[in-house]
Amino acid sequence: MKPNTKILIIAGSDSSGGAGIQADIKTVTALGSYAMTAITAVTSQNTTGVISIVSIPPKEISKQIEFTSKDIKPDAIKIGMLHSAPVIDAVIKSLSKIKAKKIILDPVMIAKGGTKLIDNKATKILKSKLIKKVSLLTPNIPEAEILSGIKIKKKEDMIYAGRKLLNMGVKNVLIKGGHLLSNKLEDIFLNKKEIVIFKNKKIITKNTHGTGCTLSSAIATYYSCGKTLKKSCEMAIKYVNHAIGTGPNYGKGHGPINHLNTIILKKKYR
């Protein structure tokens, strides 16, 4: 099996392997594509929380993006944790230099354990500059609330917040509904032309660490292979739901999901 496409992941490292760049690499690989990385921060964390975040200098992040892309041109870009304004500015400039087109932005703002992962100045630049340059924005409900200024308590609020984000310059948005108190899961994809609601049964588990990172990387992978954004979202949601449902149950806190749920090993590799 040869990789189908090439994905450049711009995100932070998670030492526990469940989220961040580690989850992204696993996802892209499990779905049959080739993963490249530009690491924005190194975090020390496990399933119970984050104890430290060390930033990578913006110049080094730019070097990773530009030097990698100069040699192996990515078919799509996935962006995760961008914790400061200088980092966001550097990424925007680098994306312009490499002429990136298919860009999925997961606006990572709060860790599963509640740790804030982005400062206020960075949030402003993300809202005013970066979101206009991406193909798709994939916020969860707390992130959509921060970006739109709308309090979300039901599906109609998700749509209202999504429309507000579109008015801010976002081309497409997928608001993830996992934080709503409901026994069904509704993720809402919308742009200026359509609204699509993806409905699934909610899996009751504490092991959901890295679901947002995984979803956005899965979308980037499917999108890079020629699927439409809507179809990419639908397929990525199915992949994540199956990964949650078959999770390995590691750790004492919010455990990881099963990124390998798509892989069947041939007998000679067992």
Image (cartoon, rainbow, N blue to C red):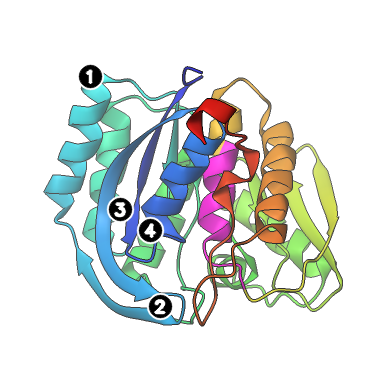
Residue, disc 4: 81
Q: Is 212 in the magenta?
A: yes
Mark positioned earlier in the residue sequence (2 or 3): 3
Badge 2: few (under 14), some or many (20 or more) residues near its Cα, within 10 Å? Answer: few
Residue drawn 41% across the image and 48% down it: 130
**110 over 229 or under it: above or below:** below
- Type of amino acid at the residue the image marks with label 2: Lys
| Type of amino acid under label 3 | Ile
Query: In what element is the residue under mark 4?
Result: loop
Give the quarter of the image for residue 195: top right
Q: CA distance from mark 2 to mark 4?
A: 11 Å
Q: Which residue is mark 1?
A: 71
Q: Residue at x 59, y 73 (%)?
A: 142
Name the residue carrying label 2: 116
Which label's residue is closer to the chain start, 1 or 2? 1
Magenta stretch, residue numbers: 207-219
Displayed quadrant of residue 230: top right
Mark 1 to mark 2: distance in Å? 35 Å
Foreground residue, 78 or 235? 235
The tag earlier along the polypeptide, 1 or 3, is 1
Crowding around mark 1 (Cα neighbors within 10 Å: few <14, some 14 to 19, many 20+) is: few
- Per the rendering, the mark at residue 88 is 3
Real-space Cα distance between discs 2 and 3?
A: 17 Å
Element class at badge 1: helix
Q: Residues within 10 Å of mark 4 (few under 14, many from 20)?
A: many
Q: Label 3 crowding class (10 Å Cα cut-off): few <14, some 14-19, many 20+?
A: many
The kind of secondary structure element at disc 3 is helix
The amino acid type found where label 4 is placed reads Met
